[in-house]
């Protein structure tokens, strides 16, 4: 090895020694000058006059505030959007977390806007400004990819605070609350140190999330008690969430008809009424929430009454099976087309929070009755929905094995980090 290295070095020295020096080359050298024609180029400023910006819709956003954050002068564009019927979904689908892309000129003129549509069909509204300075709106397809994501977090202050810190979209947080609403009272039961893990689908466009899909599996640990759920669709086409043992995690009723709110008045045999100024029983739960908050049916049922009734104001009454009844009072308005005798499913929107009837402020008055007797829905044991049939269990185990393994993986990673 040493000898070979030495030969290589000497060979290099010999090569440099035989090369002609500069003096010998000078008589053979001459200067040649040739004019070159450069290709025509666009002015540099034209390449920097258009900016592509992206913003995610935030809670409380309006179209005007969104345009402002995108760097667009909102007056002209906003006037067009308000007058164009095709652009109406932009005002109705301002979902927090949704990414919106815009092309904006240096002077703030909106040149184009791409707004993904709700519904999971990978469509978007495209608002474009043409050469005559006129806007046109059209629906376009988005080239998208679907991925399965795994996330885990610990609650410090609130569910939304934990999901925000972990980069989990608000829609997934809402789904978690829906899935575990029969086991966990998200109004009263959350504790610092509670933790959760979730496996969910995410659809992206050009590497940016467009929307979240279904939660495939999740675990929620509340006050040391772990609850697990996995999505399964049976051979009959109906899907739902089950424990790993095949028990239906969904209860016949949810604890609350609202996704998130604050209890302003609980169930009581004697309460001082703030309007009537006397003590009397409060046979329901009052959930304080802003006017317009969606109110959902707490269970499958039939509309027994929809309209105005005394101190309830605008009220919906649902009959469930033969002995259960739920009441939703002080509504600002009802869901479009809701009528007596109509069947509704658990989670269907039936109305919106208001302050009609005898009410001191915006809230939902919710009652739960069993054979006509008022019961506290936050304290009673809720009946469970039917489990999987025995002939579905083999398919259930085969279809859920992989996603439950993913849930185990992310749970174990989270525990290792906490330790």
Image (spheres, rainbow, N blue to C red):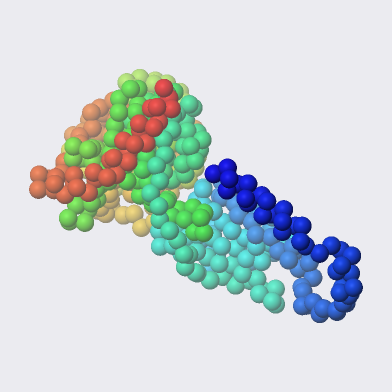
Residue 131 percent coordinates (x, y): 69, 76
Q: Is residue 126 above or below residue 4?
A: below
Q: Residue at x 53, y 71 (%)?
A: 138
Residue that sits furthest to the left in the current view = 391
Q: Position of residue 218 (x, y in %)?
A: 33, 38
Q: Residue at x 69, y 54 (%)?
A: 12
- Picture quarter containing residue 339? bottom left
Q: Is residue 188 visible?
A: no
Nearest the viewer among 270 and 140 is 140
Can residue 337 be seen here? The reply is yes
Q: Nearer the viewer, residue 191 or 409?
A: 409
Residue 115 against residue 168 in the figure, above or below: below
Position of the C terminus by quadrant: top left
Of residue 189 and residue 338, the one placed in the foreground of this image is 189
Left or right, residue 258 beside residue 345: right
Horizontal side of 259 relative to 361 (left or right) equals left
Place of residue 388 in the rendered image (x, y in percent of width and height, measured from the top left): 15, 44
In the rendered image, the vertical position of residue 5 relative to residue 31, given as above or below: above
Q: Is residue 203 left or right of residue 12?
A: left
Q: Is residue 273 above or below residue 106?
A: above
Frontmost residue, 261 versus 414? 414
- Quadrant where the image shows the N terminus: top right
Where residue 3 appears, x then y in whole percent?
A: 58, 45
**Total label count?**
0
- Residue at the spot 35% in from the left edge and 22% down from the top edge: 223
Q: Which residue shows up at 59% across the image and 67% down it?
A: 127
């Amino acid at each position: 090895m040493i000898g070979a290295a030495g030969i290589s070095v000497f060979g290099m020295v010999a090569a440099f020694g035989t090369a002609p020096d500069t003096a010998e080359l000078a008589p053979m050298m001459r200067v040649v000058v040739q004019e070159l024609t450069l290709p025509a180029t666009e002015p540099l400023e034209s390449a920097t006059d258009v900016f592509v910006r992206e913003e995610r819709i935030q809670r409380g956003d309006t179209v005007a505030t969104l345009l402002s954050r995108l760097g667009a002068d909102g007056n002209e564009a906003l006037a067009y959007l308000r007058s164009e019927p095709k652009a109406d979904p932009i005002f109705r689908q301002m979902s927090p977390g949704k990414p919106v892309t815009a092309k904006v000129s240096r002077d703030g003129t909106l040149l184009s806007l791409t707004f993904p549509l709700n519904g999971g069909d990978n469509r978007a509204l495209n608002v474009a400004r043409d050469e005559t300075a006129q806007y046109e709106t059209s629906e376009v397809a988005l080239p998208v990819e679907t991925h399965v994501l795994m996330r885990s977090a610990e609650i410090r202050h609130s569910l939304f605070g934990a999901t925000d810190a972990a980069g989990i979209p608000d829609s997934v947080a809402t789904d978690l609350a829906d899935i575990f609403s029969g086991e966990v009272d998200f109004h009263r039961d959350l504790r610092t140190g509670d933790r959760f893990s979730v496996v969910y689908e995410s659809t992206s466009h050009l590497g940016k999330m467009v929307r979240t899909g279904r939660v495939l599996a999740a675990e929620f640990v509340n006050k040391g008690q772990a609850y697990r759920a996995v999505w399964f669709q049976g051979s009959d086409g109906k899907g739902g969430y089950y424990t790993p043992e095949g028990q239906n995690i969904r209860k016949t009723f949810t604890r609350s008809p609202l996704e998130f709110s604050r209890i302003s008045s609980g169930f009581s045999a004697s309460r001082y009424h703030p309007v009537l100024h006397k003590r009397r029983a409060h046979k329901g739960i009052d959930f304080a929430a802003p006017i317009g908050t969606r109110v959902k049916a707490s269970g499958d049922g039939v509309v027994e009454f929809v309209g105005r009734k005394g101190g309830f104001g605008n009220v919906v009454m649902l009959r469930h099976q033969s002995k259960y009844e739920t009441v939703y009072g002080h509504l600002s308005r009802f869901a479009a087309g809701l009528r007596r005798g109509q069947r509704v499913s658990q989670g269907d929107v039936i109305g919106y929070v208001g302050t009609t009837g005898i009410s001191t402020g915006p809230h939902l008055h919710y009652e739960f009755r069993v054979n006509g007797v008022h019961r506290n829905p936050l304290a009673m044991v809720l009946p469970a929905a039917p489990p999987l049939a025995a002939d579905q269990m083999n398919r259930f185990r085969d279809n859920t094995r992989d996603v439950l393994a993913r849930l185990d993986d992310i749970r174990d990673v989270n525990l290792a980090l906490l330790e």
